[in-house]
Image (cartoon, rainbow, N blue to C red):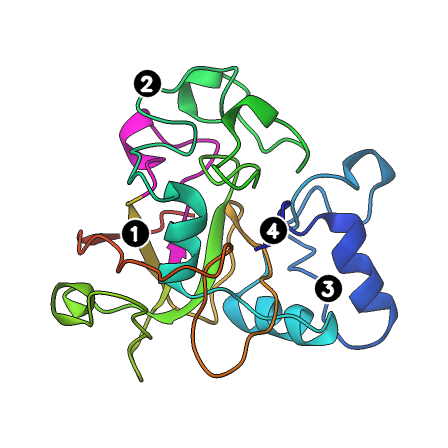
Amino acid sequence: MDKFEVSNAMYTKCVDAGVCLPPVLRLNPYYGKWAYRNLPVVYTNWYAAETYCAWAGRRLPTEAEWEKAARGTDQRRYTWGEDRPNPRLANFEESLMGEMLPVFRYPLGASPYGVLNMAGNVREWVADWYAKDYYANSPKVNPTRPESGFERSLRGGAYDANADSITTINRFRHEPDSAGLSRGFRPAPKVQNKIKSFDEKIISKPSPLFGRRSAC
């Protein structure tokens, strides 16, 4: 799993290469401006995220991989542990920022594997089709993902989310062709044969919690 969410500067390279389409510019006040180059790219739909990952020689992570990267092996509630969120750990509602921040912020809130901003900042598209009950009945370890669906899954909460919405187990969903102000993504390395976790150990299946529809 990449340490950082994809930034405006990173995404611009794909656009300049003629592969990626620009974000929805009429709605995006951050893209294409030097001052915001390190903010996560937003107003990209699921297809744009997938295109960028393919161009970069990577892919979107599955929900199971994303949750393993966030929770580690101790099944923690937040990426940093069990302590309640505060403005030193994550960009969320109580941080009072009111907008996303650079992708390299909040090292104190890093996951067990050193991944940043998996709680708050922006929600992140993952590879899976969303299915409410899939993980209640999927294999216990190394689950794959639903073969079809109508909405794609997102994880991670956002800058305007409350403390209960930025846990490692919350699931969100939205139509794959929709783009929003609080939706970004991060790539994962390509793998072969089977799903693997960071440390080559098996991945436990995600929590089968109801996935809320992403508001924006």
Query: In the figure, is residue 144 to the left or right of 108?
Result: left
Amino acid on which disc 2 is placed? Arg
Residue 118 at what x, y percent from top left?
Answer: 48, 41
Which secondary structure type mostly characterizes the magenta part of the structure? loop
Disc on the earlier residue, 3 or 1: 3
Residue annotated with mark 3: 22
Q: Foreground mark, 1 or 4?
A: 1
Q: Residues within 10 Å of mark 3 (few under 14, many from 20)?
A: some
First along the sequence among labels 1 and 2: 2
Total marks drawn? 4
Measured Cα–Cα span from mark 2 to mark 4:
27 Å
Q: Which residue is mark 2?
A: 84
Element under label 1? Answer: strand
* Spatial separation of the CA atoms under disc 3 and disc 1: 27 Å
Residue 171: which numbered mark, if any? 1
Q: Amino acid at mark 1?
A: Arg
Which one is in front, 161 or 86? 86
- The residue labelled by disc 4 is 42
Label 3 is placed on what type of residue?
A: Pro
CB-based contact (under 8 Å), mark 3 and mark 4: no
Which region shows up in magenta? 154-168
Q: Earlier in the sequence, mark 1 or mark 4?
A: 4
Q: CA distance from mark 3 to mark 2?
A: 37 Å
